[in-house]
Image (tube, grey):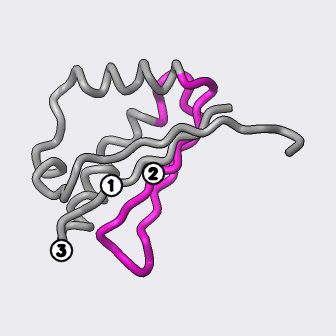
């Protein structure tokens, strides 16, 4: 099992715009081969921070997804609402620990 935490920094006042864009695009993510889960969280103390918690069968599946996602046009409303490029941190489950 492979977990990815995506941190999205949003311009002040643009959180709902980003959530709307994610609501439109994440169904494709969830259908992508190897994707097991994507959940979206907004920081209660800083609503300009959104976290995506992604579960993939293996890291390679998420890599294929990222290659596919970067090959198609993105939502310009999403891009204009970001304060910075999203960051991706990859984690590997360590059963029994």
Q: Give the quarter of the figure containing the N terminus.
A: top right
Q: Is residue 49 magenta?
A: yes
Circle 1 or circle 3, nearest the eye: 1
Q: Nearer the viewer, residue 26 or 70?
A: 70
Q: Which residue is mark 2?
A: 52
Cα distance in 3D space between marks 1 and 2: 8 Å
Q: Which residue is mark 1?
A: 8
Q: Secondary structure at mark 3?
A: loop
Q: Are marks 1 and 2 in contact (CB under 8 Å)?
A: yes
The quadrant holding residue 70 is: top left
Q: How many marks?
A: 3
Q: Secondary structure at mark 2?
A: strand
Residue at position x 29%, y 69% from top? 48
Mark 1 surroundings within 10 Å by alpha-carbon count, few (fewer than 14), some (14 through 19), many (20 or more): many
Q: Give the quarter of the figure containing the C terminus.
A: top right
Residue at position x 10%, y 44% from top? 76
Q: Which mark is residue 13?
A: 3
The disc, 1 or 3, on the residue closer to the chain's N-terminal end is 1
Q: Position of residue 71 (x, y in %)?
A: 23, 20
Residue at position x 18%, y 36% from top? 74
The disc, 1 or 2, on the residue closer to the chain's N-terminal end is 1
Q: Position of residue 44 (x, y in %)?
A: 44, 78
Q: Is residue 79 left or right of residue 32?
A: left
Cα distance in 3D space between marks 2 and 3: 19 Å
Q: Are marks 1 and 3 in contact (CB under 8 Å)?
A: no
Q: Is residue 78 magenta?
A: no
Q: Which residues are the magenta region?
A: 30-59
């Amino acid at each position: 099992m492979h977990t990815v935490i995506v941190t999205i920094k949003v311009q002040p006042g643009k959180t709902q715009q980003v959530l709307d864009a994610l609501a439109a695009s994440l169904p494709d993510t969830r259908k992508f081969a190897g994707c097991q889960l994507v959940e979206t969280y907004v920081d209660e103390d800083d609503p300009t921070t959104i976290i995506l918690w992604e579960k993939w069968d293996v890291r390679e599946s998420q890599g294929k997804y990222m290659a596919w996602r970067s090959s198609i046009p993105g939502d310009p409303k999403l891009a204009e609402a970001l304060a910075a490029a999203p960051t991706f941190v990859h984690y590997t489950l360590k059963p029994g620990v």
